[in-house]
Image (tube, rainbow, N blue to C red):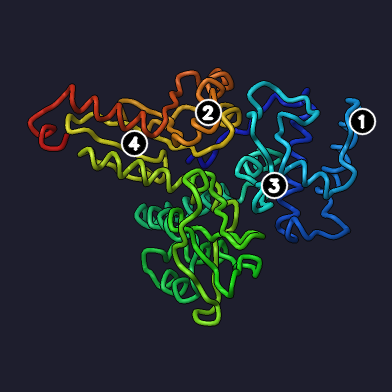
Amino acid sequence: MTTNSPEPTGWAPHDGVVLLHTLTKGLIDLEEMTDLDAFAMPYPAEAQRALDRTVLTCLLRGADPPQSLAQLLDWCANRPLSDWPLDLPDDTVGPDDRLLDGDSARPTELCHEWAKRGPDTAGEHLDREVIHTALRICQEYGEEQSYSAFRELLVDRPVLTSAEAFEVAADLLMQPVRDLIGWIYQPVPASYLHDGAYATCGRCRTLLTPTRDGTWWCERDRCRRQGPPPVGRLLYPEEIGEVLQLRRPLRQFVTGPGRAEMDLARALIELGLTVRMWPGFDSYDLHVTFPSGMVWAVDVKDWASPRLLGLAARPVRPTPPYDEAFWVVPRHRVADRPGYVAAFERNRPAGARAVRLLTDDDLVRLAAELLRRHRTPEGDRHA
C-alpha cells in the first residue's frame, strides 16, 4: 500500500471528473450522517452540491436530470457510471462501475477511491495522516517492531471489543502509538446491529452490514466476489459492552490492502522464500529474499480504478536495496475490470514508466518459475 502517493493532475478540462469528485464526497458525507435510504433535509452541503451539479450537467447535455436526491441515489446504485451524461477521460470508469452498492446502499470501494483523490482534506486523507504519524512516532522511538505491530493491528483487527481495546492499550509494543490507537477506533453505530448482535466477516474481519432482506453484506469487493460473507464473530453488546471499529478510510486504504499484502506474503513463504513485511519503516510492503540472495521489493495496490492507480504510480523506494521491484494488484481487480493493466500503463506519468504491475497470482508464478530455473542445493529443499 502506498502511503504518500502524489495527487493526480491534469483533470481540470474534464467537467465530469470534477462532478465525480463532488458526487463521491457527497455520498460519503450522507453515509456518515445517516442511512442513505432514510435521509432527510437539510442535506449535507456536499450532497446538495452533487445534486445541483448533476442536474446542471444533464440540462447542458440535453439529458433528463434526476428530480430529487432520492433519484440521484437510485442512479448511483443502479445506473452504471458509463451510462451517465458525463464527460470523462478514457479509462475513468468500467462498464459496470457504480458509486453505491445495490444491496446495502453503501458507497462502493470505487466511490471511496474517487472521494480520496479530490482536494486534500483531513477526512479524505485520514489514512495517510495516521500512517505518517505512526511512522514518525515509531522512528522517534527507534521502534520498527512497534510500527509493524501497529500495521498488523490495523490489518488483522479492524474490530475490537472494549476488553480487547484495553489489552491492546496495555501491550508494551504498542506504547509509542497508544494514543493514536485510542483515536482511530470508534464506537460502532446501531445501524450495524441485526437481532441484537454485530457480526464480523469471516474472511476480512471487518463488520458486516445487515441488508433489508435480513442477510449480511461485506464492504470489501474481494469478499463479495467470493459469495455471501461467512459470519465470523457475533458480538452482543449486552454481553461484551462497547464494540469499536477502525474509521472507514483506514478500513478502506489500510485494512483491505493489508489483507492482500499478508495473503501474498504467505503464498511466497510457502514457496520457501523469506519475506519481511513493511521493511525500513514501510519503504515498501514486502521484502522478498530468494535462496540465491536475490531480493524483490513488492508494493501491493488493492485499487478498484486502474486509472487512479496509474496516475498515482511512482518508482518503488530504493531502500532497503533490492534487485527488482514490482507493483502488485489482487487478481480479482483485473478479473472485475477488463483491460485493467493496460489502463494502468496508459495513465502512468512519464517518471513511472518502469513501474511494472502484476497480479498477485502472476507474481507467485514468476517466483516459482525462478526457483525452478535457478535451483541451488538449498533451493531444492524449498522449491
Per the image, the residue denoted by label 4 is 320
**Distance from label 3 to label 1 (Cα)?**
30 Å
Viewer-closest of 342 and 3: 342
Residue type indicated by callout 4: Pro
> Quick one: label 2 or label 1, which is nearer the N terminus?
1
Residue neighbourhood size for the residue with mark 1, other residues' Cα within 10 Å, grouped as few (<14), some (14–19), many (≥20): few
Q: Secondary structure at mark 1?
A: helix
Q: Residue 343 appears at what percent x and percent y?
A: 56, 22
Given the image, on which type of amino acid does mark 3 rest?
Thr
Which sits in the foreground, 118 or 93?
Answer: 93
Q: Is residue 140 visible?
A: no
Image coords of residue 120 (percent x, y): 69, 42
Question: Where does label 2 land, which residue?
Answer: 313
Distance of label 1 from label 4 (alpha carbons): 54 Å
Residue 361 in percent (x, y) is at: 36, 33
Disc 1 marks which residue? 59
The quarter of the displayed image where residue 290 is located: top left
Q: Label 3, on which residue?
A: 121
CA distance separating discs 4 and 3? 31 Å
Disc nearest the viewer among 3 and 1:
1
Which of 365/371 is in front?
A: 365
Q: Is residue 109 visible?
A: yes
- Label 4 Cα crowd, 10 Å radius (few <14 / some 14-19 / many 20+): some
Identified at 73% across, 60% down, the residue is: 35
Look at the numbered discs 4 and 3 and tell me whether their residues touch, using CB distance below 8 Å: no
Which tag is nearer the camera, tag 3 or tag 2?
Answer: 2
Sequence-wise, which precedes: disc 3 or disc 2? 3
Callout 2, which amino acid? Ala
Q: Is the C terminus in the top left, top right, bottom left or bottom right quadrant?
A: top left
Query: Please, what secondary structure does the residue beneath circle 4 have?
Result: loop
Residue 229 drawn above or below residue 110: below
